[in-house]
Image (spheres, grey):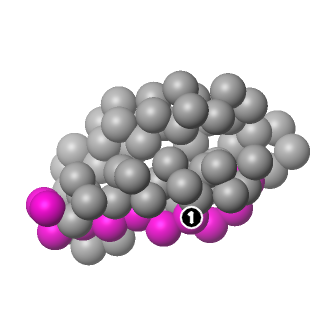
Amino acid sequence: MEQNVIDVLETIRPMLQQDGGDVQFVNIDQEGTVQVKLQGACGHCPGAAMTLKALIEKRLKQEVPEITRVVAV
């Protein structure tokens, strides 16, 4: 499951990088919570929470059904 999450994040990264941001996989726990680190412009952007939920979490849940939520650390 971890590799699937990393693969999906790799498809999202170019969109974030276009705006000066990035995302890094940190961990996934047994409950299906994925921890990511938002970097660059995404780390300090007022819309970071929306990016996390509307883009990253939505895509991960679509592609990896075992994912229950995504949190930034």
Please state if 13 lies on the left or on the right of 45 as rendered.
right
Q: Which residue is painted at 22% across and 44% down in the image?
A: 47
Residue 21 in the image, given as x and y percentages of width and height: 24, 66
Residue 14 in the image, given as x and y percentages of width and height: 26, 60
Residue 5 in sight in this render = yes
Please state if 43 lies on the left or on the right of 34 as rendered.
left
Q: Which residue is mark 1?
A: 25
Q: Secondary structure at mark 1?
A: strand
Residue 42 in sight in this render = no
Q: Which residue is painted at 86% across and 45% down in the image?
A: 30
Q: Residue furthest left?
A: 19
In the rendered image, residue 73 lying in the magenta stretch gets the answer: no
Which image quadrant for residue 54?
A: top left
Q: Residue furthest right?
A: 30
Q: Main secondary structure of the magenta part?
A: strand
Q: What kind of residue is marked 1? A: Phe
Q: Nearer the viewer, residue 16 or 3?
A: 3
Please state if 53 lies on the left or on the right of 36 as rendered.
left
Residue 31 in the image, given as x and y percentages of width and height: 82, 38
Q: Which residue is painted at 50% across and 48% down in the image?
A: 8
The residues colored magenta run 18-28
Question: Which quadrant is home to the C terminus?
Answer: bottom right
How many marks overall?
Answer: 1
Residue 62 in the image, given as x and y percentages of width and height: 53, 26
Q: Nearer the viewer, residue 4 or 55?
A: 4
Which image quadrant for residue 69?
A: top right
Q: Which residue is painted at 58% across and 58% down in the image?
A: 6
